[in-house]
Image (cartoon, rainbow, N blue to C red):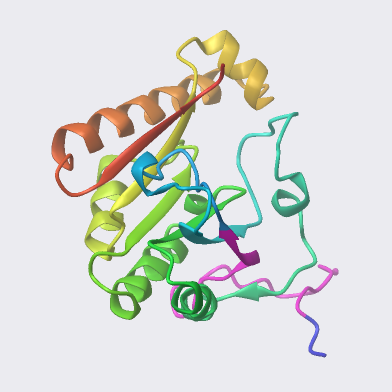
Amino acid sequence: MKELHNTVRSGMRVETSVEDRDPVRIEHGPELHLVGGKATPWWEVDYKHYVEAAIWVAGCNPRCPQCRNSAVTYDNAGRPLTPLEAAKKIISLHVLYRTRGLAISGGEPTINRRRPVGFFKYLRRMAKPRTRRHLDSNGTVLTRDYIDELVDAGCNNTGVESKCVCLETYIEITGLKDLDLAREYLDTVWKAIEYIDEYYRDEVYLGIGLVY
């Protein structure tokens, strides 16, 4: 099997220009969901039929001590997939079980911008127009232009996990030590929610995740 990860050694040339290469992420799944996530419409859930086919990508920017997907988030040994490879895998399960939705979660799927944008472009081409194409995100890097790009790519269903409104609570939940970074993330999350609600209410079904 071809080696996928190399140890950095003295004298190596490290190439940081990646624009001419397909973006990749380590991925788990796809798997089937009976209930979906925070942005799955409640009326689709009957606890009998699978509502979504989902994948989870490794890597995240916060360090939540209670992370429910830590085995995925901190996986650094799996095989990275391109957007097309990931789309083909999830579409095959979606078609087999006739799910209404296709979802990507993590980890945090948005921290490699070209990867989710490319993934949703392929889903839009491969799935029927009315299929939910669901992004499950912590929202920390969802700027306005990024949201625009995701919607243009075909994302029509977004779950944003703001977690809370108070900075002190957010720091405790996310495990972030940098006060300024935590403030920036929390501000970006809520601005993303406001932007999607204001400009894409008729195009994107929005769910919000809060701690309770």
> Overall secondary structure of the magenta stretch?
loop
Tell me which corner region of the image, top left, top right, bottom left or bottom right, holds residue 177: top right
Name above or below for residue 51 compared with residue 30: above
Q: Position of residue 138 (x, y in %)?
A: 50, 37
- Which of the pair 144/66 is nearer the observer? 66
Which stretch did the figure color magenta?
A: 4-32
The residue located at (28%, 54%) in the rendering is 156
Lateral position of residue 202 relative to residue 148, left or right: left
Q: How many numbered discs, if any?
A: 0
- In what quadrant of the picture does the C terminus appear? top right
The residue located at (57%, 67%) in the rendering is 16
Q: Position of residue 98 (x, y in %)?
A: 43, 71
Q: Position of residue 195 (x, y in %)?
A: 23, 34
Lateral position of residue 48 relative to residue 142, left or right: right
- Which of the pair 204/50 is nearer the observer? 50
The residue located at (31%, 39%) in the rendering is 206
The residue located at (17%, 39%) in the rendering is 201
Name above or below for residue 144 compared with residue 194: below
Residue furthest out toward the bottom: 1
Tell me which corner region of the image, top left, top right, bottom left or bottom right, holds residue 123: bottom left
Look at the image and tell me whether residue 155 can be seen.
yes
